[in-house]
Image (spheres, grey):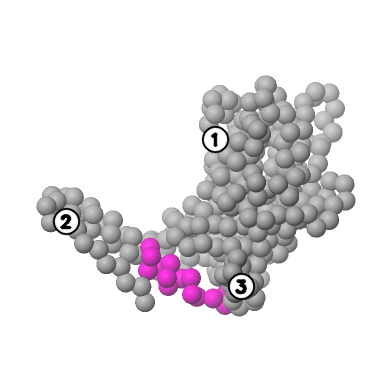
Amino acid sequence: MTHCNGSLPVNRSADTLGSALRSTLVYCAIIAAVAVSVPCRAVAAPRPAAAASFNAYINTVESRLAQQHRSAGGFLASEDQGRLRNGELMIETLAPESPPGFSGAMLHHWRGTAFAPGAKAADFERLMRNFNAYPQYYAPQVMQARILSQQGDHYQVVMRVKQHHVITVVLDTAYDVTFAHPDLAGTGTLRGYSLSRSTTTSEIESAGTPKEQALGPGEDHGFLWRLNTYWSYEERDGGLYMQIESVSLTRAIPTGLGWAIGPFVESVPRESLEFTLRATCNALKK
């Protein structure tokens, strides 16, 4: 059982005391919720219906991207070029509010767009293909990365990633990654895209210690079941427009705890995508 104790100065106004008390109670509720939800295991895989719904959703996403990548004028989704060229990131959620068929699971779908002045398409692709250097460019989220195999534009890679949000979660993930360059004759624009699909995900307990172990079926917490990432990039206007879509599947928030940790848990995919986009922009400046 988790206890949360706190004291409040007695010389504050009633409004200040009320606000501080509410903040303390919310903080206690979050800590208690995490303490309750984390030990609850036996959720090593999504239910068959949720897995099928995720696959169907991915098919829709990839069909839309394939059509998008065949278009000379709409290679990237809608963009505000003025804001992007002023250095802003455009982040938006694309997941439907209540997708059917995801009982016991949560679907997350985010898209982020950025502009890197002076960057070239070749620079971006060189960075993306250099998986062994990911711990350098994407630390602290990416701890380790290596290529298992490569056949032309097709890679099999593994990564160890870390997320810290009240608790620290370490995952070993494997991905099937493909790079492509659409033949859009006569456009005179350098562009390309990549498809990254997760194949396995293992939660690591006591990472970096002699007790380190991968949690097996019935032992992990369902922090991440699936993660597909789609990059699209286009060189023009004196720089590089980059767009990333992230689609992931996680365990649903336990019943009764959504009010406390729902907004927190749902922020993780967005924050991770935003971090990746900013880190990529920074890497292209070097």
The numbered mark at residue 210 is 3
How far apart are the alpha carbons under marks 1 and 2?
A: 41 Å
Read off the residue under disc 1.
Answer: 89
Callout in the foreground (2, 3): 3
* Residue projecting furthest to the front: 210
Give the residue drawn at x 81%, y 41%. 180
Name, please, the residue furthest toward the right.
151
Q: Are marks 1 and 2 in contact (CB under 8 Å)?
A: no
Q: Which residue is mark 2?
A: 9
Q: Name the secondary structure under disc 3.
A: loop
The mark nearer the N terminus, 1 or 2, is 2
Q: Residue at x 61, y 78 (%)?
A: 218
Identify the secondary structure beneath mark 2.
loop
Q: Is residue 252 above or below residue 154?
A: below
Q: Which of the image's four quarters has the C terminus?
A: top right
- Give the quadrant of the N terminus: bottom left
Instruction: Read off the magenta span.
Output: 30-43
Amino acid type indicated by mark 3: Pro
Queried whether the magenta region covers residue 166, the answer comes back as no
